[in-house]
Image (spheres, rainbow, N blue to C red):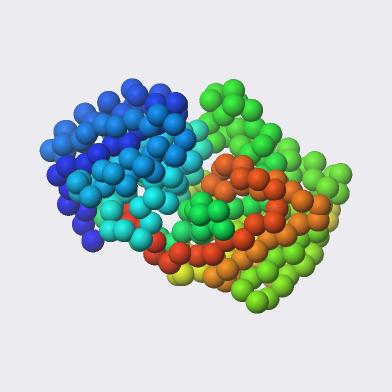
Amino acid sequence: MAVLIRRVVVIANPASRRGKRLATRAQSALASRSVVADLVFTERPGHAAELAVQHSPHYDAVFILGGDGTVMEVAGALAGSDARIGVLAGGTGNLLARALGIPLSVPDAVAALVDGEDLLIDLGKFDSGRRFAIAAGVGIDATMIAETPDWLKRRLGVLAYAIIGSRAALRAVLRRDFFRARVTVDNTVHERDAAAVMIANFGAVLGERIMLGPGIRTDDGFLDGCIFSPRTLGDAFRIMWRLLRHDFKSDPCMLYCRGRSIRVETTPAMPWQADGELMGTTPFRVVVEPRAVRLMVPRRG
C-alpha cells in the first residue's frame, strides 16, 4: 500500500550520534518532498514513547531519529495502533533500518520512505512490557554487546560489533565457554549445551549478508528460536559458513524451533540482549504480538 503523507512529527534523540544536526536535515529533506515536519526532542529515558503517544493522533506519520533503543520505545508505545512509523538511522548499529532496507543517509531514507509503502510486522513482547523487533539472545551476541566499547562503536559503527563478536565466538569455542540452555517453545522443551541462543523475528542480519535460520518471517505470528552448539572450532566455522550461505540442512550443532511463546533459561544465569541493548540476566520469556506495528519501508520490487 502506498504511503501518502503531508504532515509528520520527527521525534529525535539529541544524545544519539549527530542527533540535532540530523533532525534538521530530516526536516529539510521532508520539506523538499512537500511534507511539513515538526521536530520534538527527547529529554530522558522513556520520553520518546510519551511523545509518540501524544503526537501520533495529530500527524500522518511519526518519524523516529535515533538508535535502536529509541526506535523500539516508539514502536512499543504505538503497537496495536494504526500509526505509521518511519525509521531514520541516528544511532550506531541501526539494526532495524538495515533489516528493512532503509538507507542510512537521512535524505535518502526520507525519499525512500515518502515514496514507499507500509509493512505490518510482528513484535516480541517480554513480561516487563518491553518489546523487540529484530532478535533477542543470550551467549555470544550478548557478550558482543557487553564488550564492544563506545569509542569503537562511534568510530566503526556496526563493524565494531562484528569484530568483537568474532572474538567472543572464537573465545567461547576455544575455552569451551558453553552454558546449559533450556528453551521452552509453547509446550515443548529443548535442552542442550549452547554457545548462543537467539529468538528471532527477522531472519536477515546486516542486510541479507547473514541469515539466522530457515523461513523466518516478520509477519507470520511466530518467533523463531535458534540454538547454536558448536563443540569445536570446525563446528563454529561450519555454522558461520552456513549462515552466510543460507544453508540450513540438518546439523547437530544447529537447532531451530518456532512458537508463539518462548522462555529461555540458562545454567548459570547469563546476560541477555534485545535489539542490541543489554536487558538483564536470564531467565526471560517473550510472546509474539502478531502484526503489531505499521512501518514505512522502501517500495519493494
Q: Can residue 88 be seen?
A: no
Could you say which is closer to the camera, residue 174 or residue 141? 141
Residue at image location 47% in from the left, 35% down from the top: 45
Q: Can residue 151 be seen?
A: yes
- In the rendered image of this protein, does residue 105 appear above or below residue 219? above
Residue at image location 16% in from the left, 39% down from the top: 35
**Residue 130 percent across, percent down from the top left:** 51, 51
Give the quadrant of the C terminus. bottom left
Image mark count: 0
Q: Is residue 124 left or right of residue 163?
A: left
Give the quadrant of the N terminus. bottom left
Residue 107: which quarter of the image?
top left
- In the rendered image of this protein, does residue 286 appear above or below residue 78? below
- In the rendered image of this protein, does residue 103 appear above or below residue 248? above
**Residue 183 percent across, percent down from the top left:** 70, 65
Q: Is residue 125 left or right of residue 247?
A: left
Could you say which is closer to the camera, residue 46 or residue 166? 46
Could you say which is closer to the camera, residue 228 or residue 52? 52
Residue at image location 73% in from the left, 60% down from the top: 265
